[in-house]
């Protein structure tokens, strides 16, 4: 556990004086800052409120204000209000800040004061919607002192800051070979996180999906956050998902805690190729092909016999190209691939072939059939042309 900064009473009082109070820009404008925390932890939410007040009522004034972008912090505007009193403009801004670096962090600001008068305002609004007239004004940048935060470090090993809970559910923990199981994971709570991959690909299973959905809502309470992952995992044998654990820190309670996804055993029942195939759809096709193939071979041999018998001995027929059994099977398989009418028919055909070079095409077909991916059948067939 890392020792946190200890702030004495007089030092905190001095810091409060630096961060709170009236900072006078010039005789025309007055601005004040107030923050919810003087010394937040790294990645802890800080609410910043800014008030701009016009002091010179003889002028017409406009304000433009915003924190400067920086890698040292992240900010979100969560509120704005304005009081347009006659020549007494008041604006109120509210921001949510997250410091991204420990130590002294300076939050910079951009403030522009625009000055005009009643005549120029009247001229600008005198045009109709087809003849808009620009407001003539003088823009004056105002130098604003940066706001200093003293950011405390986190305990060793902490990966997340905030208040979170991790929920998950499997649709089942047993399945057949190549039939996917589905996993739904939700991380939700209060804090500022980016999307990340929850599971990674491994050699003992195929991983589909996993594109995270991130939802954020910023308010004075902080950032309400929800990240959702939906995965499908398929394998030919049983596999084990290892335990996943995240170390988190609650800055309000000043306590660390763990978010755990337990090790999960997925039992995969092996099945034969015949059980994977749809017998009702494919058996008739195989039988028909076998029948017509037999008829074709019979007539081929019959014609060769007749031709040999009728042809004079002195004249020889041209030689036909002779294929080996393996070549014949390869040619026949290519023809069946071309004839496949659906993704399922092609998947059944490739699974029955038991060839390693078809693995990539099989994965694409599983994505179509089990994960509702849109991949054209002809595109997958083109992958098999090189076979």
Image (tube, rainbow, N blue to C red):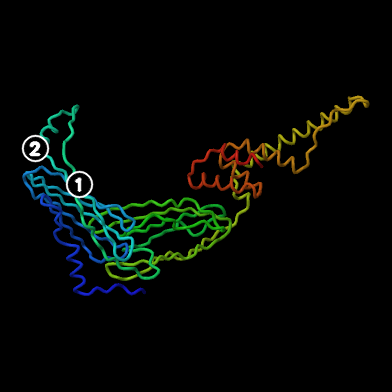
Q: Is residue 110 left or right of residue 314?
A: left
Q: Is residue 217 left or right of residue 205?
A: left
Name the image quarter holding residue 314. Answer: top right
Picture coordinates of residue 289, whole percent (x, y): 68, 37
Mark 2 and mark 1 lie on one chain; the one further toward the N terminus is 1
Left or right of 181? Residue 318 is right
- Circle 2 SS class: helix
Q: CA distance from mark 2 to mark 1?
A: 19 Å
Task: Residue 18 in the image: state x and y as whole percent.
Answer: 19, 64
Please tell me which residue lies in front, 185 or 274: 185
Residue 142 position within the rendered picture, expressed as x and y whole percent measured from the top left: 19, 50
Report the number of numbered marks.
Answer: 2
User: Looking at the image, do the residues carrying marks 2 and 1 touch, with CB atoms under 8 Å apart?
Assistant: no
SS class of the residue under badge 1?
strand
Q: Residue at x 61, y 49 (%)?
A: 359
Number of the label disc, if any, that sits on residue 182: none
Q: Residue at left 31%, top 53%?
A: 216
Q: In which quadrant will I find the C terminus?
A: top right
Which residue is disc 1 drawn over?
A: 64
The residue that label 2 is drawn on is 118
Task: Give the crowd class for mark 1: few <14, some 14-19, many >=20 residues within 10 Å.
Answer: few
State whether residue 300 is above or below residue 287. Answer: above
């Amino acid at each position: 556990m890392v020792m946190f900064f200890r702030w004495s009473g007089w030092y905190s009082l001095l810091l409060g004086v630096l961060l709170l109070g009236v900072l006078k820009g010039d005789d025309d404008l007055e601005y004040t800052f107030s923050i919810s925390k003087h010394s937040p932890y790294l990645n802890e939410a800080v609410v910043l409120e800014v008030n701009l007040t016009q002091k010179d009522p003889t002028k017409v004034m406009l304000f433009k204000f915003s924190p400067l972008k920086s890698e040292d912090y992240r900010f979100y505007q969560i509120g704005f209000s304005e009081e347009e009193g006659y020549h007494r403009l008041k604006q109120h801004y509210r921001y949510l800040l997250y410091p991204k670096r420990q130590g002294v962090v300076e939050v910079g600001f951009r403030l522009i004061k625009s000055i005009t008068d009643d005549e120029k305002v009247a001229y600008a609004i005198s045009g109709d919607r087809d003849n808009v007239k620009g407001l003539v004004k003088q823009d004056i940048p105002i130098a604003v002192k940066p706001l200093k935060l003293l950011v405390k470090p986190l305990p060793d090993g902490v990966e997340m800051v905030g208040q979170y809970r991790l929920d998950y559910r499997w649709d089942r923990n047993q399945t057949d070979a190549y039939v996917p199981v589905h996993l739904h994971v939700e991380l939700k709570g209060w804090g500022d996180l980016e999307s990340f991959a929850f599971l990674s690909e491994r050699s003992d299973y195929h991983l589909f999906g996993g594109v995270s959905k991130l939802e954020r809502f910023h308010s004075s309470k902080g950032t309400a956050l929800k990240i959702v992952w939906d995965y499908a995992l398929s394998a030919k044998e049983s596999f084990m998902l290892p335990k996943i654990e995240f170390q988190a820190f609650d800055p309000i309670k000043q306590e660390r805690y763990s978010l755990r996804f337990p090790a999960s055993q997925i039992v995969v029942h092996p099945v034969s190729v015949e059980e994977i195939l749809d017998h009702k759809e494919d058996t008739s096709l195989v039988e028909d092909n076998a029948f017509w193939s037999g008829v074709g071979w019979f007539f081929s041999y019959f014609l060769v016999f007749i031709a040999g018998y009728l042809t004079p001995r002195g004249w020889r027929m041209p030689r036909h190209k002779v294929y080996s059994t393996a070549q014949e099977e390869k040619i026949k398989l290519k023809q069946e691939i071309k004839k496949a009418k659906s993704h399922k028919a092609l998947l059944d055909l490739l699974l029955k072939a038991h060839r390693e070079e078809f693995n990539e095409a099989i994965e694409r077909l599983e994505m179509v059939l089990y994960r509702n991916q849109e991949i054209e059948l002809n595109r997958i067939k083109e992958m098999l042309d090189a076979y």
